[in-house]
Amino acid sequence: MAERMLQFVRLSQAQPEKRDIAARRSDFGEIYREFAAEAASAQASRCSQCGVPFCSIHCPLNQNIPDWLKLTAEGRLEEAHEVNSATNTFPEICGRICPQDRLCEGNCVIEKGFESVTIGAVEKYINDTAWENGWVKPPSPRQEKPHSVGIIGAGPAGLATAERLRSRGWQVHVYDRYDRVGGLMIYGIPNFKLEKEVVLRRWKLFEAGGIHFHLNVAVGTDITVDELRAKHDAVFIATGVYKARDIEVPGSDLAGIVPALDYLTASNRDNLGDDVPTFASGALNAHGKRVVVLGGGDTAMDCVRTAIRQGASAVTCLYRRDKANMPGSMREVKNAEEEGVEFTWLAAPDAFAGHGKVEAVRATRMHLGLPDATGRQQVAAIPGSEFNIPCDLAIKALGFDAEDLPAMFNEPALAVTRWGTLKVDHRTMMTALPGVFAGGDIVRGASLVVWAIRDGRDAADQIEAYVTQKASALATAAE
């Protein structure tokens, strides 16, 4: 047990041990081993307990990070879990997949010269311990309320809203077009970052707490928005963004060129034991193939590392900027490099070559120029620098845009921005339809799970305020 904090002056930063690279490449298990209790306590004791905790400020959930680090250092893990889960609906998930190097850890004030506290690994340790000891309980309201909410989307934003309102006694119904709860956490993120049981056990817990899930239900087809508005006091839209960004270059219609989400979903469904014809046929399976992934974000890292595990003969990540300008987590890049992924920096695809099926990606070397209005360096092609990368499977990991929800839901009154995301009043999170709220990626664009959780928790507060105020106004009018 640590009797005092500020141990960064004598203890070096340490992450949990990684599994052997050869073992990692051969399966989809999480790559980090569990922290031992003594190691987690020691790493937590490195916290400086600073007066202005930049780790908390730069966490989208503004978690009380120094508090639960101190409790962990003192061996008071159940209390650490209570403090952690008070501000985070899914702390065991955020501990695994948040880009801590860009958020809390990247803003730790002791980082220079000493390296930051391993906040993410300690958070994972706290909450895995909580699950093992039965400290994680279903949402259990003190009293039931007559209010009900219909939530469209069982991803992190929708689930965060569901848990928060259910814990306050609301009758909560979640509608999702897929057959499992979790959204991209279940189908978009590979097991080596987030084992699916971690998500599935939350689903079981929420059902035990009285949250009703209606799966394989497509809003606009199986049920309309008007029907949901009639059934519930409020509706929350948290569908996320699933429309893959494309690249219009010659040869884009060749076979063997696939969107990242299709590829990752097929792999995750196969790992879950589903029958996946496109995986079995090899169309969405990298085994024995030369794979080129286009993009430099976290989705691209998920794709290259999945291809390695599927037994690809070669895996290349093609990105038009340099390593320092990659939008994804540097930890993920490092893990990919360790596992054998080849990175081709400062190169952009010009065309796909092949006869009926992709055989190569034609690319041009790029150079970085002056910053644009956003402060990011512009990229420009180097004349005469074209080259080919042999390829049997090209995966486009170029980001995601919003689907056309007004058309999909057959609800033209839903207003959208010029990016296709839902337009809301950012003070109340309400859409153009009274009583219909929205949050998460469908409002802010493709973002992080932790931001979706933040939006979901905020939306629950706004929904409760709206319904309570409306009920009060009706009661006053009836008097």
Image: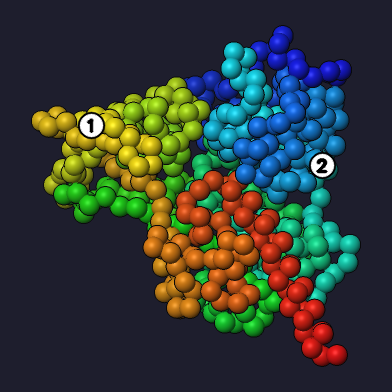
Q: Quadrant of the N terminus?
A: top right
Mark identifier at residue 82? 2
Colour scheme shown: rainbow
In the visual, does 154 lie left or right of 5? left
Q: Residue furthest right?
A: 142
In the visual, does 114 lie left or right of 396? right
Say what secondary structure mark 1 lies in. Answer: strand
Say what secondary structure mark 2 lies in. Answer: helix
Depth check, front residue: 124 or 440? 440
Q: Nearer the viewer, mark 2 or mark 1?
A: 1
91 relative to 478, above or below: above
Residue under label 1: 366
Q: Which residue is found at the position 62% from the left and 33% from the top? A: 104
Q: Alpha carbon of mark 2 to alpha carbon of mark 1: how far? A: 50 Å
How busy is the neighbourhood of tag 1: few (under 14 within 10 Å), some, or many (20 plus)?
many
Q: Which residue is found at the position 74% from the left and 58% from the top? A: 164
Q: Which residue is found at the position 43% from the left and 37% from the top? A: 327
